[in-house]
Structure formats: structure tokens, C-alpha cells
Amino acid sequence: MIEWSLKEGVYELVMSTEPCNEIGETVVEAFERFLDTVDTDSAHALVIRSGLNSGFSAGADLRELYRQLSSRPEKEHEAALREFIDRIHSMMDRLDMLPLTTIGVVNGVCFGGGFELALTCDILIAEKNARFAFPELRLGLIPGFGGIPRLKRDTPNSVVRDLLLTGRSINAKKAQAVGLVSQVVPVGEGQRAALATAHQATKFDREASRTCKRFTKRLPAAELAEERDIFVRLATRPILKLALKKFVESDDLRPYLP
Amino acid sequence: MTEVLNKLIAHSAKRYGADPTTLAAGDDIFEKLKIDSFQAVELMSELELEFDVEIPDYELQGVNTFGGLAEVIAKRT
């Protein structure tokens, strides 16, 4: 479930899809609905946060992806993957370029597609228990929701390679040290800190804020297109299906750990 | 190493409401603390901050016990 409200010029969007805001059909549809109806004339800022203790988002809904691929003949997989990835990219690009000051509050798990969603925000506030990772290489993939170009936009390439090529996770303090996160706050303080930041944004002239955002945060369009192609090429190899099958059928209590 | 183990057990017990006297080096962390994968990720962050270390996930492969985890942490302190 995703709900949003607008109060005093600030949208607050709360994701509460159990177990950890996995990004599948339901979540994408909800974001698309939000983006279709968001009132950018009345609002100055948007806070995106999780309503769950488990975390911000554990990433793509791999169980749903596995079910969808399994229900289609092999020859349709490439077209299905491309359709899926194009739709997600469109949603992420719209969020990224929204003419509002966007603030993401990250708690707990922020992995894969969830990390990619966080990277669309202008400013990230992390609670102390936040943990960021791109574990896609474990599935024989690269992040496919626009994560690499957006991570490259905000951090040095050495950080990008470290996170991608090892699949390791980093805590909030490290994320702040490498420039991903603006503020680290105690657990449970993220919402308050984000709303305070958002209300600060409402004090500024709207046109100046929008112009500043456009000037300082460009959409890396060429790299995003390249990422989509690489993702689809890698995802149509048999290794993905084997990895998804292993993940979905595993009774391991620790599927998110290496 | 003993100091790290004691601190690790004390932190974990307090965090997840376990009796520290029932936790030992050879115990399975997940079974004893009854935590899921999300809580395990959270615990990793807390331990990194508590011990002021960085623990890459791949160094935890095959580590299930308090003793094993204490050893990984001790090597990085």
C-alpha cells in the first residue's frame, strides 16, 4: 500500500507494502498514480519514506518477476523484460525530474531497486540503521532501474565499482562519508527531519528552486538508455532464471545476505 | 576476542530482548535471537557503529555463530 497526502506545501508519500516495499506491479502502479495526480503548483516538496520497520525497500519484487517470466513462453521473455524495464525507467525518470524538492528517508534495508528509487530523490536522510546495497551481480545482472547512472551522478566511480562489483552493503555512516546521504539521524527521527527539511524548501521562491534543481540535477539520459539495453541483454540469459528460481524456492531465512 | 564476544552478546541480547546468560559463542545467531533477514541487516549496521568497523558482507559468508561473528569483528578492530 502506498499513500500520500499534501499539507502546507509538502507531500508525504508513505510506502507500506509488506514485507519490505518490494517493487512490483502494485508499487509501480501506485507511483504512476501519484505522478499522474501530483499537484506541482500547490506543493514545494515531497517526502518519500517507508511505513515499515523492515526498511525503505528491498528492491524489485523477484517473486513476481519469476512468476511472470515462468507464465510466458521463452520467446516472449525479452519483450516482456523490455516492457517491464521501460515502464520502471519512465516512472523513475518522472520522479527524478519532478519539479519539487524531493527528500527520501531511508531506514533499514535499501537494496537494489529500492536503492535505485532512493537515488531519484534530491536529498537523502538516513536513519542510523539504514543499509544500502546493489546485490544484482549475485543474480547475474546489473541494476536495471536507472541505479548506475544515478549513483555515478552522485558519487565517485570508485564507490560505484566497490558497491557493484562486490555486492556488499554499506551503513548510513559510510553512505554519508561517500556523499550519498545528507543527514544521518537516530532511528525513528527520519520523518521529522525530512519534514523539517521539506518545510525549509517551502520558504524559497518556487521558480528559483525548480530552476536550481534543473541546473544541478540532470537526467543522465544516454547512460540510462544504455543501462536498459545491458540489463535486458543480461536478463535474457539462462543464469537469471536459475538465480530467480533459487531465490524464490529457497527456504533460507537469509535470502538478502550473500 | 573475548571482550568483543562479550560486547557482541550484550548488544544483541539487549537489542532483541534475549537473556545474555543463555547466549554462547557456539550458538546460532538467527536461531537464538529469532531474527529474520531484515533484522540481521539492521544488526550488522548497529554492530559496525558499535565497534566502529566496516564489515563487508562477503566476510560473513558461512558465519552463523556469535563466536564466528566476534572473530570477524575482532580482525577489523
Image (cartoon, coloured by chain):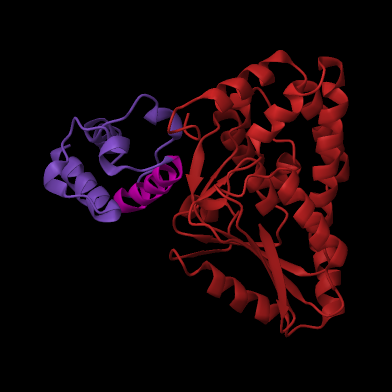
Chain colours: A red, B purple
Asked whether, in this view, residue A128 is left or right of residue A230, the answer is left
Q: Is residue B44 magenta?
A: yes
Q: Is residue B40 above or below residue B65?
A: below
Asked whether, in this view, residue B25 is left or right of residue A198, the answer is left
Percent x, y for residue A137?
62, 27
User: Residue B41's image quarter?
Assistant: top left
Q: Residue furthest left?
A: B21
Q: Nearer the viewer, residue A113 or A226?
A: A113
Asked whether, in this view, residue A127 is left or right of residue A59, the answer is left
| Magenta range | B37-51
Residue A97 appears in the rendering:
no
Q: Nearer the viewer, residue A42 or A160?
A: A42
Q: Main secondary structure of the magenta part?
A: helix
Percent x, y for residue A125?
57, 63
Percent x, y for residue A86?
86, 39
Q: Nearer the viewer, residue A30 or A229?
A: A30
Residue at 52 percent of width and 53 percent of height: A177
Residue B54 appears in the rendering:
yes
Q: Is residue A124 magenta?
A: no
Where the N terminus of chain A falls, by quadrant? bottom right
Residue at 58 percent of width and 27 percent of height: A248
Residue at 32 percent of width and 42 percent of height: B34
Q: Is residue A81 above or below residue A29?
A: above
Q: Nearer the viewer, residue A182 or A193?
A: A193
User: Residue A49's image quarter?
Assistant: bottom right
